[in-house]
Image (cartoon, grey):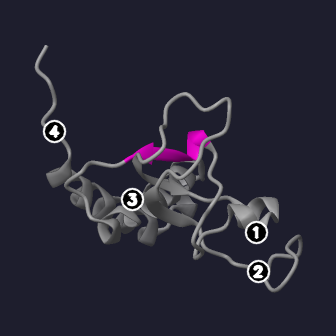
C-alpha cells in the first residue's frame, strides 16, 4: 500500500486530545491545552507520530488548540477535511475530488458553533 512504511503500521492521521508534554522549542502550546491536529506517522514512518494510541507526537505546526465547546468526537473531523481541501486547492481543477469539498464543508460546519464571531474593525 505505502511502500516506504514498515508493516504492521498504524495509519491514523487525525487526532484530538490534551497536550501531555512539549518540546523545548514549542512556543504556541502548553501542557494540558486541548488540541486538534494531524499526525504524520504514515509520511515519516515513525510510529510515535501515528494516531490510534494513548500518546502521539505531533509537530507544533500540525496542531492547534480547540475551542472548549468542541467535543473530542467533533474535533477529529476538521484536520482531515482541511488537509484534503488544501490538496484539492493545490491540484489542477480536473483533479479536485468532490469528497474533499464535502469534508471541508463538514469541518467548517462543525467549527462554526464553537468559534467566536468575527471582530468588527
Residue under circle 2?
A: 9
Q: CA distance from mark 3 to mark 4?
A: 17 Å
Residue under circle 3?
A: 78
Which SS class for mark 1?
helix
In the picture, residue 42 is in which quadrant?
bottom right
**What residue span does the magenta drawing correspond to?**
60-65
User: In this view of the protein, which residue sits in the foreground, 104 or 42?
Assistant: 42
Q: Earlier in the sequence, mark 4 or mark 1?
A: 1
Confirm or deny contact between disc 3 and disc 4 (CB under 8 A). no
Q: Earlier in the sequence, mark 2 or mark 3?
A: 2
Please tell me whether mark 2 or mark 3 is closer to you in this view: 2
Give above or below for 99 relative to 107.
below
Q: CA distance from mark 2 to mark 4?
A: 38 Å
Q: Earlier in the sequence, mark 1 or mark 3?
A: 1
Give the label on residue 57, or none.
none
Confirm or deny contact between disc 2 and disc 1 (CB under 8 A). yes
Residue under circle 4?
A: 116
Which SS class for mark 3?
helix
Q: How many marks?
A: 4
Please tell me whether mark 3 or mark 4 is closer to you in this view: 4
Confirm or deny contact between disc 2 and disc 4 (CB under 8 A). no
Q: Earlier in the sequence, mark 2 or mark 4?
A: 2
Which SS class for mark 4?
loop
User: In this view of the protein, which residue sits in the foreground, 47 or 102?
Assistant: 47
Mark 2 burial class by Cα count in 10 Å: few <14, some 14-19, many 20+: few
In the picture, residue 105 is in which quadrant?
bottom left
Mark 3 burial class by Cα count in 10 Å: few <14, some 14-19, many 20+: many
Instruction: Specify whether residue 9 is painted magenta.
Output: no
Residue under circle 1?
A: 47
Q: Earlier in the sequence, mark 3 or mark 4?
A: 3
Q: Residue 26, how many percent across, how many down?
A: 60, 32
Q: CA distance from mark 1 to mark 3?
A: 22 Å
Amino acid at each position: 500500500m505505502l511502500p516506504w512504511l514498515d508493516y504492521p503500521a498504524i495509519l491514523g492521521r487525525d487526532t484530538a486530545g490534551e497536550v501531555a508534554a512539549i518540546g523545548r522549542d514549542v512556543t504556541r502550546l502548553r501542557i494540558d491545552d486541548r488540541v486538534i491536529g494531524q499526525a504524520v506517522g504514515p509520511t515519516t514512518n515513525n510510529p510515535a507520530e501515528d494516531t490510534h494510541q494513548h500518546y502521539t507526537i505531533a509537530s507544533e505546526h500540525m496542531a492547534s488548540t480547540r475551542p472548549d465547546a468542541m467535543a473530542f468526537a467533533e474535533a477529529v473531523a476538521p484536520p482531515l477535511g482541511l488537509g484534503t481541501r488544501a490538496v484539492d486547492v493545490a491540484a489542477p481543477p480536473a483533479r479536485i475530488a468532490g469528497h474533499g469539498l464535502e469534508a471541508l464543508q463538514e469541518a467548517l460546519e462543525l467549527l462554526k458553533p464553537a468559534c467566536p464571531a468575527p471582530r468588527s474593525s
